[in-house]
Amino acid sequence: MPFPATLIFIPGYKGSRLVAAKAKTTRWLTASQIFPWDRTDLAFLREAAEASKPDLVPDRLLAALKLGPGLTKDIYQGFLVRMQQKLPAWSMVPFAYDWRADLLEQVKQLHKFILALRRQGHQNFHLIAHSMGGVIAAYWLKYGDRPFSGQTPGWEGLRMVDKVVFAGVPFQGTSQAMWYALQGDPVGWNRHILAPAVVSTFPSSYQMFPSLESPWLFSLETRKPLNPKDAAVWTSLGMSRLGNEPERINFILRQLKTGANIMMAIQHPAPVSDRNKTPEKILNLTGRGYATKHQLLWSQNQRRLMSVPPRGKSSPETYTPYAEGDGIATAASSTLPVAYGAFGKDAAITSRHEQFFHLSAVDRLVLKFFSNSKSNL
């Protein structure tokens, strides 16, 4: 007997477990990796010259992290357990993906994943997508697995689902992505596992940069905007330390172009003939109440990124270091793009980016939104 509905949960950045493709040993994330002596290599290496190194593949949702006997850090598990309790007849199916990789490749994987579920008899799909997972879902809803070349959206993905919930999705990118690529992203006491030399190999890092059309990166010394599309900027940022400089910079520029195309596709207008007859299919949860990195300063002399200038230095005239948001996605970036607004609405809540699914208010909003779907609760 088929399930009356299927809930597909799409996690955000770092939200899927990665294992060695051959040995199937866990490479992300284990309790030991929060300590500084761990030297796990998560670099994204797909070049032919590096093919001898074991690659990593997504295994399953990183729902929780067991830190020791009786001690577990909840990530998504508590939320999914509560959803299963409230929706006992529904099938809960997480979509795990390689959060380091090209986002368009993950769009294709999501498309294949949902088609496979349909063949297995799953029906009445409900999506919940967090953070970067929401960028993947947003593109898929609008274009399916097709490449974007300025065409009018066919909403292939949206036609296949009943309801969609976005949470903390940076539809216009986030400057935090560049911060991680150049400054690193410590995991507990471990500054190696997601060090700059590692994160800066991830295609997804550059694809999540903010729009390249609006200035958001400034030079501390010249007080002028820096253009991330300029190869000379990346030379000044020290990308040569990552290997062959021309190859690495070309790689970065390719990923920036892909990311810009993804953001353009999501923001691309899509006329709706009669908005009054359009069913409400999307609920977009946006976080508020926390200072969120908006624009960044690069000091060539100090060779580092910063949010605010050091004492004695002034900011560029148009520079705004922080904006309202959830700590990762600004409120402006996480607002539902206009085209999607024809099918849904925004709901602002006070929440940090990583805390959305720990809040009872989110549970209530999601369940209320799902209550008028095709499936009986």
Image (cartoon, rainbow, N blue to C red):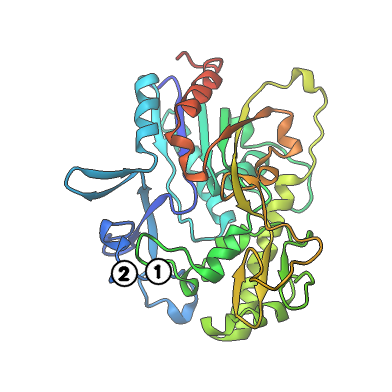
Give neighbour class at mark 2: few <14, some 14-19, many 20+ (Cα, 10 Å): some
320 left or right of 352?
Answer: right
Query: Could you tell me residue 5's position as x and y percent?
Result: 45, 23
Q: Quadrant of residue 186?
A: bottom left
Q: Nearer the viewer, residue 22 or 130?
A: 130
Please give the name of the residue rendered at 49% of the width and 37% of the height, measured from the top-left corner.
356
Q: Quadrant of residue 58?
A: bottom left
Q: Which residue is mark 1?
A: 191
* 1 and 2 marks in contact (CB < 8 Å): yes
Relative to 221, residue 156 above or below: above
Q: Secondary structure at mark 1?
A: loop
For the N terminus, give its image quadrant: top left
- The answer to whether residue 3 of the structure is visible from this angle is yes
C-alpha separation, residue under disc 1 versus residue under disc 2: 7 Å
Please give the name of the residue rendered at 38% of the width and 63% of the height, measured from the top-left corner.
56
Give neighbour class at mark 1: few <14, some 14-19, many 20+ (Cα, 10 Å): some
Q: Which amino acid, mark 1?
A: Arg
Q: Nearer the viewer, residue 16 or 326?
A: 326
Relative to 229, residue 151 above or below: above
Query: Could you tell me residue 167's position as x and y percent?
Result: 55, 38
Q: Secondary structure at mark 2?
A: loop
Q: Which amino acid, mark 2?
A: Pro
Relative to 8, residue 328 above or below: below
Please give the name of the residue rendered at 60% of the width and 64% of the height, measured from the top-left corner.
178
- The answer to whether residue 253 of the structure is visible from this angle is no
Query: Could you tell me residue 262's position as x and y percent?
Result: 68, 53
306 left or right of 363?
Answer: right
Q: Nearer the viewer, residue 205 or 225?
A: 225
Q: Which residue is mark 2?
A: 36
